[in-house]
Image (cartoon, rainbow, N blue to C red):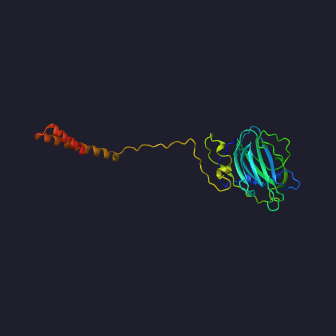
Amino acid sequence: MIPPVFAIQRRDAPDSLADAFRHASWIWTLEADSPYAPAGDRVFRRTYTPPGTLTSVFADIIMTVDDEFSLYVNGIYIGGTQTEGSWTAAQRFNVSLQPGATVFAVRGKNVLNGATGEDTTAGVLAAIEITHSDGSTSTLISNNNWLASKVIPTNFEQPHTDDSAWPEAHLISQYGAPPWLNGIAVPAPFIAANLPSSTFTAANLSSSTSIAASLSSSTSTAANLPSSTSTAPSFTPLPLSSKNLIGPIVGGVLGGVVILSLLITLLWFRKRGFKLKLSSSIFLLIWFRC
């Protein structure tokens, strides 16, 4: 499974991926009246293999689909449309990657015009920045390098699925051109925070949208996450001082005075003829009262 990268959003950071998103193209399957399409689902795939000996570490993804979508990375569901009709606000995901090739798969859904029942515009718009183990990056955008299919095979999102017969995605228009123009809101970039132990699993969280609120588009500030190796705080005993010793000294002196007084009282009674038994009883009585 793909473990998530914990991240926060920061709006004052440079955002090269947002710039790439604004240079991406709307894509869909080829339709008779493109960019209008009948209601229904379509699937899209893009496979990325890092160059040379590099290893992919994580991917920063900005995506929207007119009207709805689900995003998968190497077969794992990452996130998708949360509210019907919210496609005018793109979503952002930050996902850690496994070594080797990475398959990005999208299931898009188009919905008919509720008032007229007519076909509506349909399209996928995406930009993906992949960071490698040496810190270098590669950027993918939605274009005709993606594959698209009207037929949805079982396990379409899985890396092992054979997509060799899938046609290229149909290129509709670049961002900013009709019919969508440039009215898509873009979330702020994610900045990775301190990560917990490597034993943390993907079952805890699958996408950065779940992290923030699922972390989607609100402004956040950096905060260190607690370490999984944190231990209970240690306590250092206070050093002894002259002030600390006053109490025990005074108590010892008073105790000595009391004992001496009891001995004197016992001798006084014995000199006046009382028996030892009576004197002992008085001694004990006085002792217990003290």
18 left or right of 164?
A: left
85 left or right of 267?
A: right
251 left or right of 129?
A: left
Image position, residue 87 (x, y; %):
75, 56
Identify the residue shown where x is 33% and y is 46%.
242
Outermost residue toward the left?
272
Identify the residue shown where x is 74% and y is 46%.
72
Quadrant occupied by the C terminus: top left
Identify the residue shown where x is 71% and y is 47%.
78
Identify the residue shown where x is 65% and y is 41%.
201
276 is higher (above) or lower (below) than 62? above
Image position, residue 30 (x, y; %):
87, 51
259 is higher (above) or lower (below) than 181? above
119 is higher (above) or lower (below) than 153? below
Quadrant in the rendering for residue 162: top right
Circle count: 0
92 left or right of 35?
A: left
Image position, residue 89 (x, y; %):
73, 57
- In front here: 51 or 74? 74
- In front here: 21 or 157? 157
Q: Is residue 45 visible?
A: yes
Q: Is residue 290 visible?
A: no
